[in-house]
Amino acid sequence: MIRENKIKAGLKEGKNYIGTFVKMTDASSVEIISMCGFDFIIIDCEHTHFSKETVVSLLRASDISGITPIVRVRENDRAQILHALDSGALGVMVPETSTKESLQKIVEDTFYYPIGKRGYTASSRAAGYGFMNPAEYAKEANRNIMTIAYVETSEALENLDEMLTVPDIDVMWIGPMDLSQSLGVIGESKHPIVLDTIDKIIEKCKNSGIATGTIAANAAEAKKLIDKGVQLIGLSSDQAMISYAGRQFISQLKK
């Protein structure tokens, strides 16, 4: 049975949420992240070797722990979005979206009639393997599933005003590293031109009533972004947090 997505509703009320990326295959990673107090996870299929079975395992752990699960698919592809949602994701994050048409495709592939044209089944894991009322499941899926598109290319910057007119997109996610490449300062995500562009994106999204999201390396960065009006923060990742803690332990011992 599909869970209520409190984050989707909260974004419309101006609330902010902190999550992290999951890049490790073991489901205990999701349980630990939840126990730490994070609001959501982003299961990262774009930059990992996750199989479909791994994604389902991580989604099961999110259901048990109560954390909101989002799946970052590898590309704007109907089959990948369908698998993530049928498996039980409460949100899809779709990279490399740079046009109004690419966002319309996300909406079409994510939602059931009357919003979109998502392939329908009432026997998926998300629908309780057929134990939910079929019509009720479609209605609940449309109400709870969250869509996240990206602003990370020069093309997206040019088309942003048009992209922001697409209904049923919940979050525009800003990719600082890809933006640095698009702006000619590759790898310099803190370059003034990148930071200035990010501020402009945030302001445009605010004026259009669409939430923004982006990454933060640490708590101090996250606080600054929240102060600017960013509502969805991807703070580090499970891998990075383990690496950071491990380095700290060894550094302290060697002193």
Image (tube, helix red, strand yellow):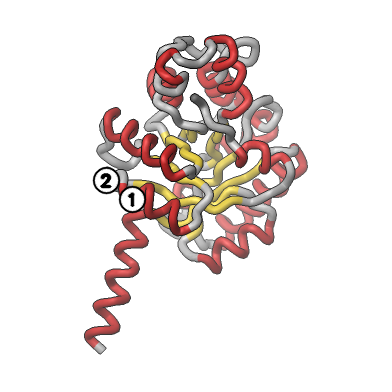
In the rendered structure, are the residues bearing label 2 and label 1 in contact, judged by CB atoms less than 8 Å apart?
A: yes
Give the position of the C terminus as an image quadrant: bottom left
Nearest the viewer among 23 and 65 is 65
> Is residue 106 visible in this depiction of the protein?
yes
Mark 2 belongs to which amino acid?
A: Asp
Q: Secondary structure at mark 1?
A: helix
Q: Residue at x 53, y 49 (%)?
A: 39
- In-image side of 122 versus 221 (left or right): left
Residue nearer the viewer, 177 or 215: 215
Identify the residue shown where x is 56% and y is 28%. 145
Outermost front residue: 131
- Mark carried by residue 163: none
Q: Residue furthest right?
A: 207
Image x and y of residue 96, in percent: 47, 34
Q: Height in image: 244 above or below 249?
A: above
Give, as a three-letter code, the residue at label 1: Ser
Residue 230 position within the rendered picture, expressed as x and y whole percent measured from the top left: 64, 52
Alpha carbons under labels 2 and 1: distance apart: 6 Å
Is residue 77 among the parts visible in the rendering?
no
Q: Quadrant of residue 138?
A: top right
Residue that badge 1 annotates: 29
Give the residue furthest to the bottom: 255
Residue under the point 55% across and 46% down? 174
Q: Is residue 120 left or right of residue 59?
A: right
- The image shows residue 40, relative to residue 80, as above or below, that is below
User: Dot 2, crowdedness within 10 Å: few (<14), some or many (≥20)?
Assistant: few
Q: Residue, x 50% and y 41% (percent of image)?
A: 68
Q: Which residue is mark 2?
A: 26
Which of the 4 image quadrants contains residue 130? Answer: top left
Q: Residues within 10 Å of mark 1 (few under 14, many from 20)?
A: some
Q: SS for tag 2?
A: loop
The relative height of residue 68 versus residue 81 in the rendered view (above or below) is: below
